[in-house]
Each structure stands twice: as structure tokens, then as C-alpha cells.
Amino acid sequence: MPEFVRTELIFGRRPVVEVLRGPRRVFQIFLTEPAKNFLQREMRKYGISKDFRLSVVSKQYLYNLIKRPDHQGIVARAEEFEYTPLDIIIDRQPEILVLAEGITDPHNLGAIIRSANLCGAGGVIIPTKNSAQITPVVVHTSAGATEHTPIARAESLAHTLGVLKDHGYTVIVADKPSPNSVPITKFEPAGKIAVVMGSEGEGVSGKVRRKGDVIVSIPQAGEIDSFNVSVAAGIILFYIAHKLGILSE
């Protein structure tokens, strides 16, 4: 492995398989014997032919390597995650884009990316500050969706939304139910949609909210204040993807 290559340790069976299926280079995989059998089956299933060192080790070795018990018997040393340039994502003009503001919990960010991928979103955009970044924990929580979803960073989401609007996007901002919000079940998407999700505590900031064309909310019946942000993202993205015909019946 060249000395100048920055690497990170990806853990978990699905994330490691998806890293192998994606564009990243993988240099070494540490795994238990049961996980080795799993990996060999998955490599045959997907026709994976990447060249890497394979080391059969104990569960304790894996725990010592990443200091986490949820490794599922496998850890890969891969080159560091590479973000997609923002202008490339915008130039592709996918039907759905997701912008996540203030999502500092890596588990929530990973779950949002997973839903974005499954609902056919063409990219996820996160701020360079005050946000979780793409770490091995995010890769793990996304079940490897980070490897198949273009992810960009932006200095200003408000400015980025202005650019997206210039490219014909309708910007919808997710919020709690209020007199100013439209229930997502009554929203009729048309054309390209940019979905903005904010933090559970503060929601979307004022400067980003002012860029929105529509404020949408999810109807709720219980006593709890709101949906988890990643659950809300999944509901909203599924509805929009279904309405746009991206998801087949």
C-alpha cells in the first residue's frame, strides 16, 4: 500500500461487502472464519474481484482493532471515503436530492443516506461544519449505502439551495406539523425536488428555511413531539419517490 494513501477501518458484514462493490480500494480484510465463508459467498454472488490481503483473526483481535463490539466478525482497511464534488451532482440534475442540515448524530446521518439510496435520490449534500461527516460509523449505519450514493459537502446550504432553484428544483423543507406546513400526503411533487431535513432539536435554520418553496410535515397521532429525523426522511422520501414514479409497484 502506498504510504500517501489515507485509510480507514470499515466494519460490519454489509458495509464491507458494499465497500468491495464500490469504487474504493480495499487493502486488507481482517475476519473470523464464519465471516470468511460469508464474504466468499458474497464475492461470488456479486462477481467481486478486488485484490486485497485476507487475514483470519479472532473476535477479540477485531475488537482490539476498532474498539467496538458490533464488527460482525469483519473489518476492512480501505482508502478514505471520497466526497463527490458538489458541481458534479448538480450538473447531473437527479430527480431527488437530499440536504441534511445540522445532523450531528452519525447514526441519523447514516440512516438518512440509506433511505436516500433506497428511494432513488441522486445525491446527499451536507454542510462542512456543524454536521456529522462520512465516517466508518456512518458507513456502518447506512449499511454501505454511502458507497453507492454521491455525497457532497457545501460551505453554505442556503447558497446551495439558491443554485438548485436556479437549476429548476423545488425546495421542500421538512418540519413539525403547524398551520404553515402542508401534510406530506397532500403535497404533489412535480419536476426535480430538493428535500431539506434539519436537526431534531432546532430543525432547519431560518436562512435555509427562507429558501424553501414548501414546508411539509408528517401527520402524527401520538403524544411524542416528533419523528426521529431519519425516520421522517424515510417517510418523506418514499412518498416523493412514489409520486414521481421512481419506485416501481
Image (spheres, rainbow, N blue to C red):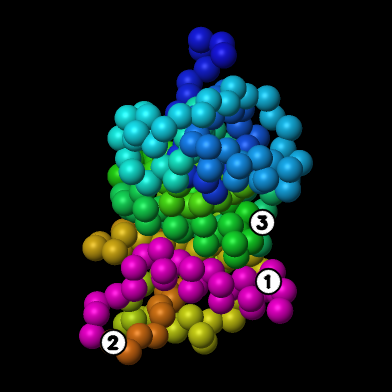
Q: State the residue in front, 216 or 13.
A: 13
How far across and how far down the image is residue 190, in percent? 65, 74
Image position of 12 (left or right of 26): left
Residue 222 is marked as 2
Residue tagged 3: 94
Quote the CA–CA distance across marks 2 and 1: 29 Å
User: Which structural element holds mark 1?
Assistant: loop
How far across and how far down the image is residue 21, in percent? 66, 41
Quote the CA–CA distance across marks 1 and 3: 14 Å
Residue 173 is marked as none
What's the magenta region?
A: 223-249
User: Which structural element holds mark 2?
Assistant: loop
Q: State the residue in front, 195 or 135.
A: 135
N-term-proximal mark, 1 vs 3: 3
The vertical placement of 178 against 83, above or below, is below
* Image point (44%, 45%), residue name: 72
User: Which structural element holds mark 3?
Assistant: loop
Mark nearest the camera among 1 and 3 is 1
Residue 247 is marked as 1
Residue 211 visible (yes or no): no
The vertical placement of 178 against 55, above or below, is below
* Tag 3 near tag 2, CB within 8 Å: no
Instruction: Give, as a three-letter code, the residue at label 3.
Output: Pro
Image position of 123 (left or right of 91): left
Instruction: Give, as a three-letter code, the residue at label 1.
Output: Leu
Image position of 131 (left or right of 56): left
Instruction: Give, as a three-letter code, the residue at label 2.
Output: Gly
Is 131 in the magenta? no
* Image point (57%, 38%), residue name: 36
N-term-proximal mark, 2 vs 1: 2
- Residue 52 quadrant: top right
Q: State the residue in front, 16 or 248.
A: 16
